[in-house]
Image (cartoon, rainbow, N blue to C red):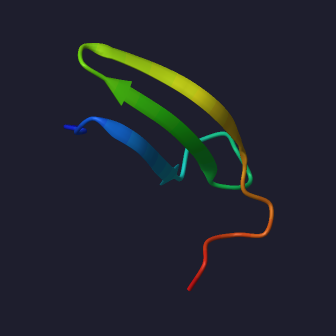
Amino acid sequence: MNLRQGEHEIIRDVVGFQYPLKIVVSIEKDAATVITNYPLKKGRKK
């Protein structure tokens, strides 16, 4: 996954989890910082 600088929201289905995972990450130069990650119990927005 190629991400540009800034804040990104990623939602992925992961084997072993009942709900998709939502991950918020901040990219600055050559560092990636995970701000939060949690199961998305309400599901994906349509």
Q: Which residue lies furthest to the right in this view?
A: 41
**In this rendering, position of residue 4 left or right of residue 10:** left
* Residue 31 location, quadrant: top left
Residue at screen point 49% across, 50% down: 9
Residue at screen point 39% across, 20% down: 32
Q: x%, y% of residue 21?
A: 62, 47
Name the quarter where the C terminus is drawn.
bottom right
Position above or below: 2 against 22? above
* Residue 2 location, quadrant: top left
Q: x%, y% of residue 44?
A: 61, 71
**In this rendering, position of residue 42 left or right of residue 34:** right
Residue at screen point 35% across, 39% down: 6
**In this rendering, position of residue 33 left or right of residue 30:** right
Number of numbered discs visible in the structure rendering: 0
**In this rendering, position of residue 27 left or right of residue 34:** left
Position above or below: 21 against 37? below
